[in-house]
Amino acid sequence: MNKQLFKSLDNSKLGWACMSPIMEPLRGKDPILKSQVYSELTPSQQDLFMFYAYYNHAKHSLAEYYWWTAYYLAQPKIWTEIKLRLRNFGDENIVGLLEETEEVLQKWSHPRSMESFDVSVNDLENDSLLRESLSPLYSHFQKITPFTLNQIGIYIRKHPEEFILVETQQQIKENVTNSDYPSS
Protein backbone atom coordinates (compact mmCIF):
# COMPACT_ATOMS: atom_id res chain seq x y z
CA MET A 1 0.00 0.00 0.00
CA ASN A 2 1.44 3.36 -0.86
CA LYS A 3 1.70 6.09 1.74
CA GLN A 4 -0.78 8.37 -0.04
CA LEU A 5 -3.49 5.70 -0.06
CA PHE A 6 -2.81 4.85 3.58
CA LYS A 7 -3.22 8.50 4.59
CA SER A 8 -6.29 9.09 2.43
CA LEU A 9 -8.41 6.16 3.58
CA ASP A 10 -11.10 6.70 6.18
CA ASN A 11 -10.45 4.73 9.39
CA SER A 12 -13.50 2.56 8.73
CA LYS A 13 -12.12 1.45 5.34
CA LEU A 14 -8.49 0.99 6.34
CA GLY A 15 -8.91 -2.49 7.82
CA TRP A 16 -10.43 -3.95 4.68
CA ALA A 17 -7.84 -2.21 2.51
CA CYS A 18 -5.19 -4.08 4.50
CA MET A 19 -7.02 -7.42 4.45
CA SER A 20 -8.64 -7.61 1.03
CA PRO A 21 -5.40 -8.46 -0.83
CA ILE A 22 -5.03 -11.45 1.51
CA MET A 23 -8.65 -12.54 1.82
CA GLU A 24 -10.07 -11.97 -1.66
CA PRO A 25 -7.87 -14.64 -3.31
CA LEU A 26 -8.94 -17.12 -0.59
CA ARG A 27 -12.69 -16.93 -1.30
CA GLY A 28 -14.06 -20.37 -1.97
CA LYS A 29 -10.68 -22.02 -1.44
CA ASP A 30 -9.88 -25.07 0.64
CA PRO A 31 -9.98 -24.50 4.43
CA ILE A 32 -6.51 -26.05 4.71
CA LEU A 33 -5.10 -23.34 2.42
CA LYS A 34 -6.92 -20.66 4.43
CA SER A 35 -5.49 -22.07 7.64
CA GLN A 36 -1.99 -22.11 6.16
CA VAL A 37 -2.25 -18.49 5.02
CA TYR A 38 -3.66 -17.51 8.43
CA SER A 39 -0.74 -19.14 10.24
CA GLU A 40 1.70 -17.05 8.20
CA LEU A 41 0.10 -13.74 9.18
CA THR A 42 1.37 -11.49 11.95
CA PRO A 43 -0.70 -11.62 15.16
CA SER A 44 -2.31 -8.27 14.31
CA GLN A 45 -3.13 -9.45 10.79
CA GLN A 46 -4.70 -12.55 12.36
CA ASP A 47 -6.88 -10.25 14.50
CA LEU A 48 -8.04 -8.48 11.38
CA PHE A 49 -8.49 -11.69 9.41
CA MET A 50 -10.80 -13.19 12.03
CA PHE A 51 -12.86 -10.02 12.28
CA TYR A 52 -13.42 -9.85 8.54
CA ALA A 53 -14.02 -13.60 8.20
CA TYR A 54 -16.99 -13.11 10.49
CA TYR A 55 -18.10 -9.56 9.68
CA ASN A 56 -18.08 -9.88 5.87
CA HIS A 57 -20.51 -12.78 6.11
CA ALA A 58 -22.69 -11.71 9.04
CA LYS A 59 -23.34 -8.10 8.05
CA HIS A 60 -25.76 -8.68 5.16
CA SER A 61 -28.97 -9.72 6.92
CA LEU A 62 -30.44 -11.17 10.07
CA ALA A 63 -30.50 -14.61 8.42
CA GLU A 64 -26.79 -14.33 7.51
CA TYR A 65 -25.92 -13.06 10.99
CA TYR A 66 -27.75 -16.05 12.45
CA TRP A 67 -26.30 -18.66 10.10
CA TRP A 68 -22.68 -17.50 10.23
CA THR A 69 -22.73 -17.09 13.99
CA ALA A 70 -24.12 -20.63 14.34
CA TYR A 71 -21.58 -21.91 11.80
CA TYR A 72 -18.60 -20.49 13.67
CA LEU A 73 -20.11 -21.44 17.02
CA ALA A 74 -20.18 -25.06 15.79
CA GLN A 75 -16.39 -24.75 15.43
CA PRO A 76 -15.37 -23.88 19.01
CA LYS A 77 -11.71 -23.27 18.17
CA ILE A 78 -12.61 -20.73 15.48
CA TRP A 79 -15.37 -19.11 17.57
CA THR A 80 -12.99 -18.67 20.50
CA GLU A 81 -10.36 -17.25 18.14
CA ILE A 82 -12.84 -14.71 16.72
CA LYS A 83 -13.71 -13.42 20.19
CA LEU A 84 -10.08 -13.40 21.32
CA ARG A 85 -8.94 -11.53 18.23
CA LEU A 86 -11.69 -8.92 18.56
CA ARG A 87 -10.64 -8.24 22.14
CA ASN A 88 -7.21 -7.27 20.85
CA PHE A 89 -8.76 -4.22 19.14
CA GLY A 90 -10.14 -3.06 22.49
CA ASP A 91 -13.79 -3.28 21.49
CA GLU A 92 -15.50 -5.20 24.27
CA ASN A 93 -18.94 -4.15 22.97
CA ILE A 94 -18.80 -6.42 19.96
CA VAL A 95 -17.34 -9.28 22.00
CA GLY A 96 -20.19 -8.89 24.49
CA LEU A 97 -22.69 -8.94 21.65
CA LEU A 98 -21.19 -12.14 20.23
CA GLU A 99 -21.41 -13.73 23.67
CA GLU A 100 -25.07 -12.67 23.99
CA THR A 101 -25.78 -14.17 20.57
CA GLU A 102 -23.96 -17.33 21.62
CA GLU A 103 -26.20 -17.58 24.72
CA VAL A 104 -29.35 -17.27 22.60
CA LEU A 105 -28.18 -19.97 20.21
CA GLN A 106 -27.25 -22.25 23.10
CA LYS A 107 -30.78 -21.85 24.53
CA TRP A 108 -32.05 -23.15 21.21
CA SER A 109 -29.60 -26.07 21.45
CA HIS A 110 -27.67 -25.12 18.36
CA PRO A 111 -24.92 -27.52 17.34
CA ARG A 112 -21.54 -27.22 19.01
CA SER A 113 -19.77 -29.23 16.32
CA MET A 114 -19.85 -29.54 12.56
CA GLU A 115 -20.87 -33.20 12.79
CA SER A 116 -24.32 -32.18 14.00
CA PHE A 117 -24.57 -28.88 12.08
CA ASP A 118 -28.04 -28.65 10.57
CA VAL A 119 -28.66 -24.91 10.69
CA SER A 120 -30.43 -23.23 7.77
CA VAL A 121 -30.98 -19.57 6.95
CA ASN A 122 -34.66 -20.53 6.73
CA ASP A 123 -34.76 -21.42 10.44
CA LEU A 124 -35.77 -17.86 11.27
CA GLU A 125 -38.80 -18.09 8.99
CA ASN A 126 -39.94 -21.23 10.81
CA ASP A 127 -39.20 -20.10 14.38
CA SER A 128 -40.60 -16.69 15.25
CA LEU A 129 -39.27 -16.86 18.83
CA LEU A 130 -35.73 -17.43 17.60
CA ARG A 131 -36.13 -14.60 15.09
CA GLU A 132 -37.48 -12.29 17.82
CA SER A 133 -34.56 -13.20 20.09
CA LEU A 134 -31.93 -12.56 17.44
CA SER A 135 -33.42 -9.52 15.73
CA PRO A 136 -32.43 -6.98 18.41
CA LEU A 137 -28.95 -8.52 18.56
CA TYR A 138 -28.51 -8.11 14.81
CA SER A 139 -29.78 -4.51 15.04
CA HIS A 140 -27.22 -3.87 17.76
CA PHE A 141 -24.55 -5.51 15.57
CA GLN A 142 -25.38 -3.06 12.79
CA LYS A 143 -25.19 -0.13 15.20
CA ILE A 144 -21.85 -1.01 16.79
CA THR A 145 -19.82 -2.30 13.86
CA PRO A 146 -19.14 1.20 12.47
CA PHE A 147 -17.45 1.94 15.81
CA THR A 148 -15.54 -1.35 15.57
CA LEU A 149 -14.38 -0.54 12.03
CA ASN A 150 -13.25 2.90 13.19
CA GLN A 151 -11.40 1.42 16.19
CA ILE A 152 -9.63 -1.00 13.86
CA GLY A 153 -8.55 1.89 11.62
CA ILE A 154 -7.25 3.87 14.60
CA TYR A 155 -5.29 0.83 15.78
CA ILE A 156 -3.79 0.30 12.32
CA ARG A 157 -2.73 3.95 12.10
CA LYS A 158 -0.98 3.63 15.47
CA HIS A 159 0.71 0.35 14.48
CA PRO A 160 1.04 0.33 10.66
CA GLU A 161 4.11 -1.90 10.76
CA GLU A 162 1.94 -4.72 12.14
CA PHE A 163 -0.33 -4.68 9.10
CA ILE A 164 1.25 -3.23 6.00
CA LEU A 165 4.41 -2.45 4.16
CA VAL A 166 4.10 1.19 3.14
CA GLU A 167 5.84 1.77 -0.15
CA THR A 168 7.38 5.09 -0.97
CA GLN A 169 7.19 6.44 -4.50
CA GLN A 170 10.88 5.57 -4.92
CA GLN A 171 10.26 1.93 -3.94
CA ILE A 172 7.35 1.71 -6.38
CA LYS A 173 9.52 3.16 -9.15
CA GLU A 174 12.31 0.69 -8.34
CA ASN A 175 9.89 -2.24 -8.33
CA VAL A 176 8.52 -1.24 -11.72
CA THR A 177 12.02 -0.64 -13.12
CA ASN A 178 13.27 -4.01 -11.84
CA SER A 179 10.21 -5.95 -12.97
CA ASP A 180 9.97 -8.31 -15.91
CA TYR A 181 7.34 -6.15 -17.59
CA PRO A 182 8.39 -4.64 -20.89
CA SER A 183 8.59 -0.87 -20.79
CA SER A 184 6.61 1.13 -23.29
Image (cartoon, helix red, strand yellow):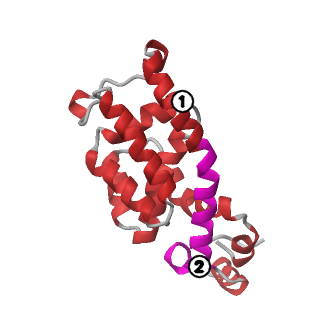
Q: Is residue 26 visible?
A: no
Residue identified by numbered label 2: 158
Is 10 drawn above or below residue 2 in the view shown?
above
Residue type of the residue flagged with mark 2: Lys
Residue 177: % across, % down: 67, 81
Q: Position of residue 47 (x, y in %)?
A: 44, 63
- Kind of residue at badge 1: Ser
Specify the label residue 149 is tagged with. Answer: none
Give whichever of 27, 146 is nearer the camera. Answer: 146
Residue with the mark numbered 1: 135
Verify whether residue 143 appears in magenta. Answer: yes
Q: Residue at x 38, y 33 (%)?
A: 104
For the image, the number of numbered tags is 2
Determine the CA span between mark 2 and mark 1.
35 Å
Quadrant holding the C terminus: bottom right
Give the magenta part as a residue range.
142-166
Quadrant in which the N terminus appears:
bottom right
Which residue is farthest left?
115
At 34% from the left edge and 46% from the top edge, which residue is drawn?
31
Q: Quadrant of residue 83?
A: bottom left
